[in-house]
Amino acid sequence: MARRSFVAGNWKMHKTVGEATAIARELRGLVSQLRDRVEIAIAPPFTALHAVAKALEDSNVAVAAQNCHAEVQGAFTGEVSAPMCAEAGCRYVILGHSERRQLFGETDVGVNSKVKAVLAAKLLPIICVGETLAEREAGKTLEIVSAQVRGCLNGFSAEQGKSFVLAYEPVWAIGTGKTATSKQAQEVHAHIRGLLTAQWGEGVAQAVRIQYGGSVKPENAQELLSQPDIDGALVGGASLKAADFAAIVKAAPGA
Ligand code: PGA
């Protein structure tokens, strides 16, 4: 059950090409000694993907896109496809982030199609799920997260699933400074692993990494990342500074 910790930084709509490459170079230096110990990725905006991938060539920091379209190409103004992300130097694509769901109308069915596109482009998905505050207060957390996980993963085989990464991000903890307690997060992570076991069996469920996201900072990372079913973090705000992000990476078990 030795899952390698995976810490990813989601930069959202922040950083110009110049700023992004500067942070990427700084980060590269700060985490170079962690090669083979912790998996690391950063997700800059589309405009900076290629330049950041170049700046990170032969390093132990991978590049992720924050979204992609389900089609390979076509008349989809403003969209970017999975093969385009692959060509720009990405290894991962974040899918179904709560901001995509809340602000851009993404659904589990839509995420499911995008996962197919990501796999077809030989990329790996980081699939985000999480409940809103109203859902948590109504006692519906596990029900909501179950529906999201089932919907996003529907139809994928164990062989495909073993390379997936999931991220549990309670919506009320994103960008709010309110972190889930390690106990709250662990409860949901264990539940998600149970869903993976039901779909793909114990072996695959034990291999899949489940990241926690929502106000992860250097100060709270170790406590969260030491939980048995928390296998890394998806970091927003604190990933915009190389030193803070590196400190979170170094708090991961195995670092
Ligand atoms: P945050 O964002 O760390 O700023 O809360 C996390 C995310 O949205 O992935």
Image (spheres, grey):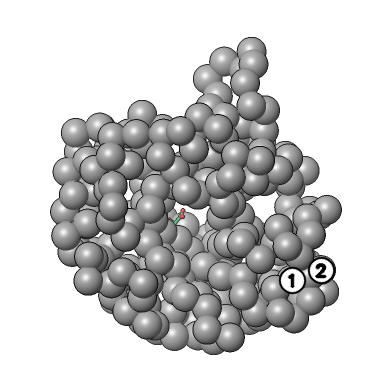
Characterize the local packing of mark 1: few (<14), some (14-19) or many (20 or more) Cα atoms within 10 angstroms. Answer: many
Where is residue 205? Give x, y as percent.
69, 75
Closer to us: 242 or 216: 242
- The residue at 81%/68% (across/down) is 199
122 to 178, vertically: above or below:
above
Residue type pointed to by label 1: Leu
Residue position marked by numbered label 1 in the rendering: 196
Quarter-wise, where is residue 146 in the image?
bottom right
Secondary element under disc 1, as helix, strand or loop, is helix
Residue position marked by numbered label 2 in the rendering: 199
Where is residue 164? Give x, y as percent.
62, 60
Disc 2 + disc 1, Cβ < 8 Å: yes
- The residue at 27%/48% (across/down) is 56
158 to 202, vertically: above or below:
above
Closer to us: 249 or 212: 249
Quadrant observed for ligand 1 in the rendered image: bottom left
Quarter-wise, where is residue 210 in the image?
bottom right
Residue 149 in view here: no
Where is residue 129? Give x, y as percent.
63, 58
Report whether the residue tagged 1 is closer than 8 Å to ligand 1: no
- The residue at 48%/42% (across/down) is 66
Quarter-wise, where is residue 5 in the image?
bottom left
